[in-house]
Image (spheres, rainbow, N blue to C red):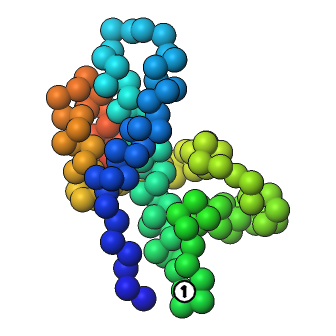
Amino acid sequence: MKAKEINYELLWHKCVDDQDDAVRKQPRTIESYDSKLARAAFGMYKLQCFCERLAAKYASPWLVFQPVEAGRIYLLNKHHWHPSQVQDLNVVDLLLLLHQELLEMKLTSEEFAPVQRWAVHMDCYADLQESAAGL
């Protein structure tokens, strides 16, 4: 099967946009708003990249999974859960349930490039770069 082309720049900016309201509600700190936003978006971005990899791994001629569905299938297989236990999991649930995998996950240079371009000048950059390299 032909590999799906992923626009990582678009994926990163969607994660940033999706975290905007949550970050606005956080109390003010010395860290800049943009830096807090990058931190919040980075977990979701790593989750999306992880699930995109799973979707490619699980793809077959008869069934193509959406990334979130692939994350659910991963958990189903890992924990030997019943399908009914994963069908209602949302991305926040997946972020928590796949935390260890995301900590250990190394981003490719292509996956990390949009994050780097957006956050290289921010206080959080060293933390994001370290997380992108995995444990």
Residue closest to the eye, 73 or 13: 13
Q: Residue at x 33, y 72 (%)?
A: 5
The amino acid on which the numbered mark 1 sits, given as a three-letter code, is: Ser
Q: In which quadrant of the rendered image does the C terminus lie?
A: top left
Quadrant for residue 110, please give it: bottom left
Q: Residue at x 46, y 34 (%)?
A: 19
Disc 1, SS: loop
Residue closest to the eye, 46 or 7: 7
Residue hosting label 1: 60
Residue closest to the eye, 92 or 97: 92
Q: What percent of the width, then of the height, locates residue 103?
A: 46, 45
Q: Residue at x 51, y 70 (%)?
A: 55
Q: Is residue 78 visible?
A: no
Quadrant for residue 96, please give it: top right
Is 93 situated above or below 51? above
Q: In which quadrant of the rendered image does the N terminus lie?
A: bottom left
Q: What percent of the width, then of the height, locates residue 53?
A: 44, 67
Q: What percent of the width, then of the height, locates residue 121?
A: 17, 29
